[in-house]
Image (tube, grey):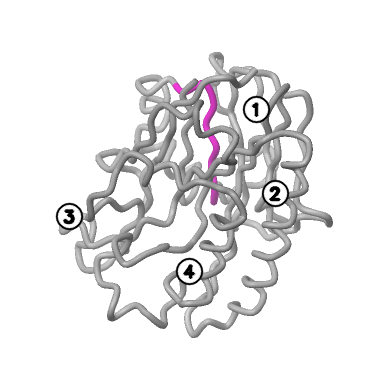
């Protein structure tokens, strides 16, 4: 099974930049999208290969939101955590033997004005994943809005107090790993300069001055089923690039 995740930074925009051609070429069994920036009925996409399509729209127009396109029919689909998801940030697809969670983690914002909210949200999200694990192992993917270690960011020293690389956010991600989840990419790739997001300023993408903030993490019970994890750095269309895994045993 090939699973992809991509923060598209506006689905309508990326549709004009080769999204359907990308989907046909990569041909994943399932793709999770973040930051779709859509309302209901604003796009009509021909998705013959993906009969199972699910949307989680943000209440605020042109903001946030998530979606999943799947070839496999889930047993059920849930939206949000324990309460209504006004920002469209979380989708949970239950399959026979696994949960798949698509997430767009809140950004702490410039000046860290939303850091306290973000950290509380992180606690609730981790508790939610551990609750799911009591039934079946979990695959969680999406834009987690944090570069975990210095290897995951081009300029760690100058970003220590910036959103996405504060000690608090990095510790929260470490807490997820300490609770039993695996950062799939680092299972296969230990080298630096592997990024998934680049600022649109100062020609950062061409210079590969980036951050690795998009992930697939899996429950420890799925480690033996994980066959590969990768970043598709050459795929354009968004300020993020897609990430993916190959894994067996999803039905």
Is 140 displayed left or right of 190 in the figure?
right
Between residue 199 and residue 245, name the one nearer to us: 245
Q: How many marks?
A: 4
Do the CB atoms of the residues marked 3 and 2 lie less than 8 Å apart? no
From the viewer's side, name the closer residue of 227 and 55: 227
What x and y, as percent, mark residue 195?
30, 53
According to the picture, the residue beneath numbered tag 3 turns out to be: 206
Q: Of marks 1 and 2, which one's residue comes earlier in the chain?
A: 1
Discs 2, 4 touching: Cβ within 8 Å: no
Q: Which mark is residue 227?
A: none
Kindly indicate whether the residue at mark 2 contacts the one at mark 1 (C-beta within 8 angstroms).
no
Q: Which residues are magenta?
A: 28-35
Q: Indicate which disc, 1 or 3, sits on the residue closer to the N terminus.
A: 1
Q: Comparing marks 1 and 2, which lies closer to the viewer?
A: 2
Is the residue 244 above or below the residue 168 in the image? above
Q: Which residue is mark 4?
A: 170
Disc ID at residue 129: 2
Q: Position of residue 105 (x, y in %)?
A: 58, 59
* Residue 192 percent location from the top left of the image: 23, 55
Give the crowd class for mark 1: few <14, some 14-19, many >=20 residues within 10 Å: some
- Callout 2: SS: helix
CA distance for labels 4 and 3: 26 Å
Q: Quadrant of residue 185?
A: top left
**Principal SS element in the magenta part?**
strand
Q: Nearer the viewer, mark 4 or mark 3?
A: 4
Q: CA distance from mark 1 to mark 2?
A: 22 Å
Q: Is residue 86 magenta?
A: no
Q: Is residue 162 above or below residue 66?
A: below
Q: CA distance from mark 4 to mark 1?
A: 32 Å
Q: Residue furthest top?
A: 48
Q: Can you identify the residue that label 1 sits on?
A: 53
């Amino acid at each position: 099974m090939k699973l992809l995740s991509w923060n598209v930074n506006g689905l309508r925009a990326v549709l004009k930049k080769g999204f359907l051609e990308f989907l046909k070429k990569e041909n994943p069994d399932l793709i999770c999208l973040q930051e779709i920036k859509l309302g209901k009925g604003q796009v009509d996409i021909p998705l013959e290969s993906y009969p199972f399509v699910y949307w989680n729209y943000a209440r605020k127009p042109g903001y946030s939101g998530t979606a999943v396109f799947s070839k496999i029919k889930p047993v059920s689909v849930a939206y949000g955590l324990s309460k209504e998801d006004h920002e469209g940030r979380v989708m949970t697809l239950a399959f026979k033997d696994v949960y798949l969670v698509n997430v767009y983690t809140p950004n702490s914002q410039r000046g860290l004005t939303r850091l306290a909210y973000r950290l509380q949200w992180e606690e609730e999200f981790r508790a939610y994943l551990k609750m799911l694990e009591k039934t079946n192992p979990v695959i969680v993917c999406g834009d987690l809005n944090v570069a975990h270690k210095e290897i995951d960011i081009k300029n760690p020293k100058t970003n220590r107090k910036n959103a996405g690389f504060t000690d608090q956010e990095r510790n929260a991600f470490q807490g997820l790993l300490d609770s039993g989840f695996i950062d799939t990419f680092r299972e296969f790739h230990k080298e630096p300069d592997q990024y998934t997001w680049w600022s649109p300023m100062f020609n950062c993408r061409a210079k590969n001055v980036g951050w690795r903030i998009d992930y697939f993490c899996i429950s420890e019970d799925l480690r033996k089923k994980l066959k590969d994890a990768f970043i598709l750095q050459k795929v354009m269309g968004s300020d993020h690039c897609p990430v993916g895994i190959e894994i067996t045993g999803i039905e």
